[in-house]
Structure formats: structure tokens, C-alpha cells
Image (cartoon, grey):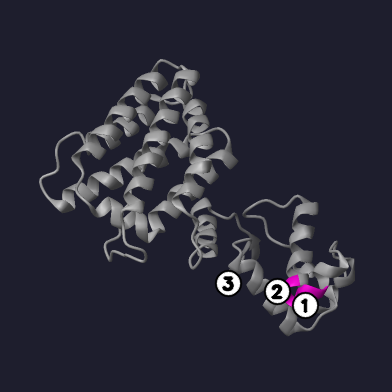
Amino acid sequence: MKIEDTPLDPKTRKRLRRPDIVAQQIRERIIEAGLRPGDRIPADWLLPESVKVSRGTLREALKVLEFQGLISSRSGPGGGIFVSSVEPGEAIGLLDNLFLFDPPSIADIYTLRKQLEPELAASVAGNLTAETFQALQGCIRLYEDEPETAEEEYAQRLAELDFHEELTRHCNNPILAFTCSFLLSLLRDMTVCRSIYKEPNPALRETGLHYQVRLLRAIKAEDPELCRTIMRGHMLEAEKYMLERAAMRPPGESSPTSSTDSR
């Protein structure tokens, strides 16, 4: 196994450092060998003489793979280098950083949410266990009553977020679930959204509650098309509200209080 054997086009190879090329090489070999999370990577794969690079370059390559979440090391008896799986939350955290200094607009995010959230809702209709359905009902119970304090209203916002996150956990399409969760994370990080949801707005809570109660009924009735319709209306109303409130805020206004909404 040599670096030159790595299946990268010449332009890509020129842009990568040698440790990155070796990391890609090891990654490809893991895939080709069909290794799974928890499997030990054969020691002879990780010898400098096997990959034809220095020990320092190989060490850097392993650091790259560990940072990416693809391998982990264990010391002591039975130790070694093992294949790891990347958790969705970890991947979303890295993707969030991609937009940290140049975030998308609210309109950008809702362009996708209007298309994807209805499909997310439809995907869980008829596929939820009684326990999962109770978890969704539990999210709603947290914001059924009028909040008495700003802190309680903030907690209700988080409960609305939990409702949508709970849907992603039970979607049978992992790419759809991941993308919807990522969009929620982007909204959670955006300064303008934090500022908007910091504002008291009883009507906003009532609107969200109305849609989510109707959605639960449609899910329980195992009606995917009705779920799509309800969630589509929910996203349209949410987009309208968010864009209107954002347009009223001075440019660059920020809030130190972290807050968001599931809408």
C-alpha cells in the first residue's frame, strides 16, 4: 500500500498534505476491507514501512482520522487502533462551524425547511411506538400553559425545539433526519433568531401549539398526507413570522441570551 495508490485525482493530490493523503488511504482501506465500528485496524496497516512515509507523517495522519471521528485508540491489554463511528451531533457541530462567520439567511434555511419538514412529518406517520408518541406529547405539555417568567418562556421555546428534534430521531430516512436537525442547529446559532425568540410573544406559542397538536393527531391517525399538509402550513407561518421580525431589527443587533424555537 503506497501513497501513490490513493484514488485521488492529480489536482486534489496537490492540494493535500502528505498526512491527509495517508489518512485518505487508510480510510479507503477500511471501507474496502468492510471493517465496522469497534473492529481493530490491523497493525501492519499502520507501519511506516507499509505506507512508505515517515513515522511522524503517519502519526499526523492518524490524528487527522481521530479528529474526523473515524478511529480511536486504546492503551493497555487488548489496545490498539479501532474503527469508530461518527455521531450525528458531532458532524453537525463541525458543519455549524462552516457557517460560523458567514451564516445563511433565515430565508435560505426556510427554503429547505418548507420542503423537508413536511416529508419528515409524513415519514413518522404510522411508524411511532407508543413510547415515542408519549415523548412527543411530553414536549407539548411543557408549553401548554402560559409562562409566568421570561425563563419559563425560554424553556418553552426549547421544548418546541425538542418536538422537532424528536421527529428527526424517528425518521426512517437518515439523510432527511440529519438535514432537518442541521437546519435546526443553524437557527439555534443565528444571532438574529436568538434575538427574535428572546421577545415575549404569547401568540407565537399558541400558533406552534395549534400546529403540533394537529400534527400529533395526524400521526396517530397514520395519515402521511395530512401530516405533510399540517407541517407545510406550520413552516409557511413560521417563515413569515421570522422574516417579518428580522426585517424590524436593526442591522447587526445581537443578544447575549441563547434562545431559539423549533419552528
* Residue where numbered disc 2 is placed: 61
* Tag nearer the camera, 1 or 3: 1
Give the amino acid type for the residue marked by disc 2 in the picture: Ala
In percent of the image, x 55 and y 63: which residue is there?
98
Vertical order, 210 against 112 (above or below):
above
Image location (x, y in percent) of residue 216: 35, 24
Examine the image and state in which quarter residue 91 appears: bottom right
Q: Which residues are magenta?
A: 14-20
* Residue where numbered disc 3 is placed: 75
Mark sitting on residue 108: none
Between the residue at mark 1 and the residue at mark 3, the CA separation in whole angstroms equals: 26 Å
Residue 19 part of the magenta-drawn span: yes
Mark sitting on residue 18: 1
Q: Earlier in the sequence, mark 1 or mark 3?
A: 1
In-front residue for pair 236/57: 236
In-front residue for pair 22/152: 152
* Tag nearer the camera, 2 or 1: 1
* Tag nearer the camera, 3 or 2: 2
In-front residue for pair 237/9: 237
In percent of the image, x 78 and y 71: which residue is there?
21
Q: Is residue 42 visible?
A: no
Q: How many other residues sit within 10 Å of disc 2, few (<14), some (14-19) or many (≥20)?
A: many
Q: How many other residues sit within 10 Å of disc 1, few (<14), some (14-19) or many (≥20)?
A: some
Give the amino acid type for the residue marked by disc 1 in the picture: Arg
Between the residue at mark 3 and the residue at mark 2, the CA separation in whole angstroms equals: 19 Å
Name the dominant secondary structure of the magenta segment.
helix
Give the amino acid type for the residue marked by disc 3 in the picture: Ser
In-front residue for pair 115/142: 115
Q: Earlier in the sequence, mark 3 or mark 2?
A: 2
Q: Earlier in the sequence, mark 2 or mark 1?
A: 1
Examine the image and state in which quarter residue 230 appears: top left
